[in-house]
């Protein structure tokens, strides 16, 4: 009897090892193994034999945030019950209204970019590094904020480039936006978005070009920014493939995807994605003495 138990135990260990190494089992052996383990109530081994079902279940649960990072269209919206609360971002630092209402006039060609709620309170600053989707994300203070330089002191005759002085990669030195979804057709009533990331230079009023950006093999635009010298608000003008333009182009932060986006119609995006994204105003904050 001891010999039989030793043989069964050895057989069980060998089969487990072979399966964990993805070694092809002989024909019929998986069925025999299932019967054997079920008779001993060994559900752990049964779960090991069907990892592909678990993998498919995980794929089905993929969030829109992950899909957006990869430039994929969102999943169909989930119908909310009347009065249901929408998901919101994690608790943020206390608002600092004065940062989003700076003194008029640009005193320095180097500054930070504050992201503000539409009511004028501070959300944070564009961070010097990317989030998981290779796009610029948020930081609560200037300690880790992106520094950008203006081409000169304003006023400007048109759109400008914003050079990232401490950006992710000097190969993509400008703050721009890269292709996302329906990127060449920013129009009211349509779902569209692009990722705010590093980019090489693309002339103003020009559709996306393949010049290299933080999201690798995608086209992008860079000279899209306008600075109001009185309010110091930064706005964007996106150029479509047919040379039509959307101004101002809505800008928002998506906490789940951990990044900033431009979109053709924020209300359409907000109604479909429903992940607590926040419409923002960008404000240039000069760094004194630089």
Image: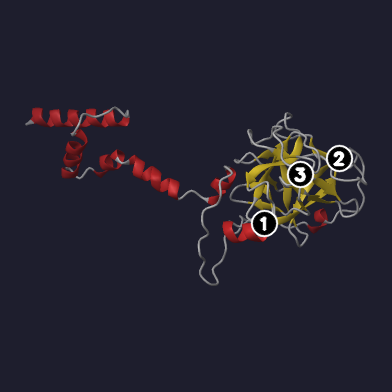
Residue 23 appearing in the image: yes
Location of residue 273 in the rendering, given as x and y in whole percent from the top left corner? 58, 56
Distance CA(mark 3)–CA(mark 1): 20 Å
Comes first in the chain, label 3 or label 2: 3
Type of colouring: secondary structure
**Who is closer to the viewer here, 274 or 186?**
186
Image quarter in which the C terminus is found = top right
Residue marked by disc 1: 278
Per the image, label 1 sits on a secondary structure element best described as: strand
Direction from residue 20 to residue 214 in the image, left or right: right
Residues packed near mark 2 inside 10 Å, few (<14), some (14 to 19) or many (20 plus): some
Determine which of the numbered discs, if any, sits on residue 65 in the image. Answer: none
Distance CA(mark 2)–CA(mark 1): 26 Å
Distance CA(mark 3)–CA(mark 2): 18 Å
Among all residues in the image, which is located at the extreme left?
Answer: 1
Residue marked by disc 3: 142
Per the image, label 3 sits on a secondary structure element best described as: helix
Direction from residue 27 to residue 251 in the image, left or right: right
Among all residues in the image, which is located at the extreme front?
Answer: 242
Residue marked by disc 2: 150
**Who is closer to the viewer here, 86 or 139?**
86
Residues packed near mark 3 inside 10 Å, few (<14), some (14 to 19) or many (20 plus): some
Rendered position, 188 above or below 139? below
Location of residue 173 in the rendering, given as x and y in whole percent from the top left corner? 76, 33
Comes first in the chain, label 2 or label 1: 2
Comes first in the chain, label 3 or label 1: 3
């Amino acid at each position: 009897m001891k010999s039989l138990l030793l043989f069964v135990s050895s057989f069980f260990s060998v089969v487990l090892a072979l399966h964990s190494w993805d070694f092809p089992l002989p024909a019929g052996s998986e069925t025999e193994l299932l019967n054997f383990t079920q008779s001993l109530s060994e559900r752990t081994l049964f779960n090991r034999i069907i990892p592909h079902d678990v993998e498919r279940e995980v794929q089905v649960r993929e969030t829109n945030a992950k899909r957006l990072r990869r430039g994929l269209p969102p999943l169909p919206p989930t119908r909310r019950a009347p009065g249901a609360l929408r998901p919101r971002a994690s608790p943020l630092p206390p608002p600092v209204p004065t940062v989003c209402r700076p003194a008029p006039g640009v005193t320095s060609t180097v500054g930070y970019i504050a992201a503000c709620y539409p009511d004028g309170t501070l959300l944070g600053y564009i961070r010097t590094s990317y989030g998981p989707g290779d796009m610029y994300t948020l930081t609560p203070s200037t300690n880790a904020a992106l520094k950008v330089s203006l081409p000169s002191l304003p006023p400007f005759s048109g759109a400008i480039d914003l050079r990232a002085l401490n950006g992710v990669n000097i190969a993509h030195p400008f703050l721009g936006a890269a292709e996302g979804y329906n990127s060449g057709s920013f129009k009211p009533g349509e779902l569209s978005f692009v990722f705010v990331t590093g980019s090489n230079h693309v002339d103003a009023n020009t559709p996306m070009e393949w010049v290299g950006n933080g999201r690798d093999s995608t086209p992008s635009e860079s000279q899209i920014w306008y600075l109001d010298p009185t309010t110091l608000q930064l706005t964007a003008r996106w150029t479509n493939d047919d040379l039509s333009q959307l101004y101002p182009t809505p800008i928002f932060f998506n906490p789940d995807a951990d990044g900033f986006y431009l979109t053709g119609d924020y209300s359409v995006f907000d109604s479909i994605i429903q992940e607590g994204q926040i419409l923002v105003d960008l404000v240039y904050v000069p760094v004194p003495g630089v």
